[in-house]
Image: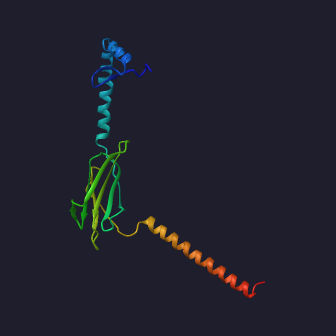
Amino acid sequence: MYLYSFQFDSTLGKFVGFNEYGRNLAESWNNSTIVHEERAVMDWFCKGNAEILDYSISDKSVQPKVKLSSVTRAGDRHLAVLMCSAYEFYPPHIKVSWLRDGKLMTSEITSTMEMADGDWYYQIHSELEYSPKSGEKISCMVEHASFNKPMFYDWDPSLPESERNKIAIGASGLVLGIIIAAAGLIYYKKKSTGQWR
């Protein structure tokens, strides 16, 4: 209980208490030489290492992993919603834009969310709501420090691989079911006519 009653606040440059006991301790420590020692440690160790750390990561960059997907919304079947997501990139500054047949789209973008992952990486999600037209090309353009030039990700309106796999598995199951049913029917007919005894 008394261990966490006060702490050194580097912003204020002195000890601060959290309760009456902590405030008394903080006042006592602030009037002693300990506060000067803590300030010296902060200046020497913390600030020096912060500069080294900042220098060692400031020129680093990690390319985003980009995924373009279709999102289903309840209620509106006339509008299509696409989401362009970029994951695990650094530094945090990134620009995500949408293009229709090579022309920049602005009014159809419904939301853009940027988030920190908590591990020095970042992610961003941008949604586009539009009325699909036959033959048009929708692209997500991503600009980031890790790229030499903007990267374009084109939307492929065909079924995603996971959906194609589900259809293939379902069709295979149907064919197998028909074969087993036909074999059972043939066996039943031959057994009932007495050909097999």
Nearer-the-camera pick, 97 or 47:
97
Residue 102, compared with residue 12, is above or below; it is below
> How is the structure coloured here?
rainbow
Q: Position of residue 141 (x, y in %)?
A: 27, 59
> Residue 97 versus residue 177: which sits nearer the camera?
177
Q: Is 32 rendered above or below residue 118?
A: above
Report whether 76 appears left or right of 192: left
Q: Residue at x 24, y 68 (%)?
A: 101
Q: Residue at x 43, y 66 (%)?
A: 161
Residue 153 image point, x, y percent: 31, 61
Camera-side residue: 175 or 81? Answer: 81
User: Split into 4 quadrants, where in the image is the N terminus?
Assistant: top left
Residue closest to the eye, 122 or 146: 122
Q: Residue furthest front?
A: 75
Q: How many marks?
A: 0
Query: In which quadrant of the rendered view does residue 75 lie?
Result: bottom left
Which quadrant would residue 136 be assigned to in this image? bottom left
Image position, residue 78 (x, y; %):
30, 68
Res. 75 in view? yes
- Spot the residue most to the right: 197
Residue at 26% in and 47% down = 93
The answer to whether residue 147 is visible is: no
Question: For the C terminus, which image quadrant?
Answer: bottom right
Q: Position of residue 73 (x, y in %)?
A: 35, 61
